[in-house]
Amino acid sequence: MASTRRAERASLSDRVETARAEAEQREVHDERTASLLGIALGVAFLVCFATGVWSHLQQHPPAWLELPIGPVGLYRVTQGLHVATGLATVPLLLAKLYSVSPQLLRRPVVRGPVHAMERLAILALVGGSLFLLVTGAANIARWYPWSFFFPVGHWWAAWLVLGATTIHVAFKAPVVRRALASAALTSTTPNAPGELTRRGLFATVGVAAGLVTLTTAGQTVPWLRRFALLAPRRPDIGPQGFPVNRSAAAAGTEELGADPDYRLRVTRGGETLAMLSIAELRAMPQSTESLPITCVEGWSADAVWTGVPLLALLESVGLGAVDTTVRSAQTRGGYRTSEVSASAAEDRRCLLALQVNGEPLHPDHGAPLRLIGPNRPGVLQTKWVIEVEAT
Amino acid sequence: MSGDRSATDDPTADLRPGPLAWATIVVGWVVMIVAVVGVTGDLERDELGSWSRWVVGSALVHDLVVLPLVLGAGWLLTRLAPVPWRVPLRTAAVVAAVVSLTVWPIAQRWGARDDNPSIMPLPVARNLALIVVALFACALVAGAVAQWRQAAPREERRSEPEESTT
């Protein structure tokens, strides 16, 4: 009885191995296909990683690094690229995993310590890569079915994938070199009628990636707006003609804009230097600037802002361009404050805005007062400002 | 290189990392360890559990659910669809599935909030359905053209003897 079961198992194992070996001979599963998809995927992930690190530095600037104030729309480009590339990478990653799928059935699973180490890195690479794309796609839909803080989880997963990719490249570089240098290692089995060829697979990936990009990139690229059929945002839809990430209702600041007792506090070292009402802020020199608002989730919109240059406010209390902390009235959330460096404060386009597009700010856009500056992530354009603390 | 090496050989069997490769592997592991130490330090215990489940779970769901479904669908299509229809239908199915998967949370409006109508303001589910219908319509046209092309030479061959007798 036991020997019969063993024989059945052996027979099943043989059949699986035969099917695996046959699948591996197909063009879509050969080394050339896997190598080319791997290179494309590597480039896409590199773009996402570089733009992601840039976004992280913008939000958490280290003391030793002075980030550029301009060009005004630089962050809009880098973050738009980050999200668009991430979305276009979904078909690329799935195609790459499909191309190497016969490897999953190779036995033995582990052939020794070096192979075990390589497999472990591949688990981190596959799991981490899928994690980045799944969590990124969920984040742009503002859907968080997990308990960790998205930016933290996404950030460290990116480093995990970078490390795992480095290991994978070290192991596979000779295979890629061979596969690209010679057609000898590619499949010699003619494609069956109706079977997907390598070119067919690449074309399918291209169509899927192109379609995803065409139908979503309009959330940040103005001339693609009309095709933004699947985009999570439209830059022209929202209060006063552009979107909102956190509403006043969610922040508990709905009444702040209409509060007659509202005062902006300007402080330094615990000392209050000024308490300014809206009327007093309006009486100060005003400046109007056209600046995009750019969300880390990839959408961006143009708007014209009017308000007091931060530098003018600081000068009105006897200070110059200094590092400042801008505080919001919202009581919850990780972005209640933001830092403005002295060089950013020196730029007269950095405003404490009272108006947008010629109207007083809508509560959802930060009424009565919000920070807006060039080349800053939206989460750092602090809304419902109640205090400016100079250092 | 070795032209006698068949595509069925294990592509990793003959790998012997050299010194440069080993140095790269060490760098890779250092970066991975930094990532694990970083995430361990930044997340609470239950958050870390959630993060780990999503990393490992993503790989498992792909390998144990998504991939078998894709292979099963491909097998079914090969069994059911006539040869000229297979490539157009396969292409349409893959593109439709991948695009749908990518924007599914948006189409389902899982992150929508009553207090913020600027989040997902478009009828993405309807637009996605229209795109999927358009993809399969294109596949049907392409399949019909392929079928017609395949049939045309046979009819020509059948007509050849008649022409030769005149």
Image: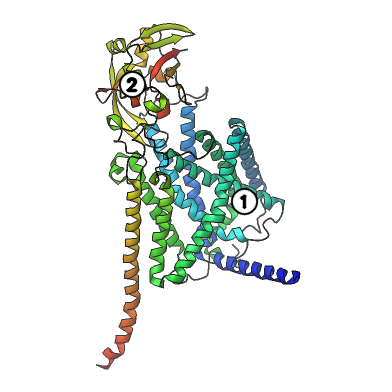
Question: The N terminus of chain A is located in which quarter?
Answer: bottom right
| Pointer 2 local density, CA inside 10 Å: few below 14, some 14–19, many at least 20 | many
Residue in view at x 59 percent, y 67 percent:
A21
Q: Is residue A278 at least partly visible in the picture?
A: yes
Q: Quadrant of residue A265?
A: top left
Q: Nearer the viewer, residue A105 or A241?
A: A241
Q: Nearer the viewer, mark 1 or mark 2?
A: 2
| Vertical order, A112 against A223 (above or below) | below
Q: Position of residue A389 (x, y in %)?
A: 44, 13
Q: Residue furthest bottom?
A: B165
Is A218 on the left-hand or right-hand side of A41?
left
Q: Position of residue A199 (x, y in %)?
A: 43, 61
Is B121 on the left-hand or right-hand side of B51?
left
| Vertical order, A21 against A363 (above or below) | below
Amino acid at dot 2: Ala
Residue in view at x 47 percent, y 46 percent:
A44
Mark 2, residue position: A367
| Pointer 1 local density, CA inside 10 Å: few below 14, some 14–19, many at least 20 | many
- Image disc number at residue A171: 1
Label 1 close to label 2 by CB (< 8 Å): no
Q: Earlier in the sequence, mark 1 or mark 2?
A: 1
Is B88 on the left-hand or right-hand side of B164?
right
Q: Position of residue A215 (x, y in %)?
A: 34, 47
Badge 1 and badge 2 in a common chain: yes
Q: Using the numbered discs, state the Cα–Cα distance from disc 1 to disc 2 in whole angstroms.
A: 56 Å
Residue in view at x 33 percent, y 21 percent:
A367
Q: Is residue A376 at least partly visible in the picture?
A: no
Q: Quadrant of residue B49?
A: top right
Q: Position of residue A148 (x, y in %)?
A: 54, 35
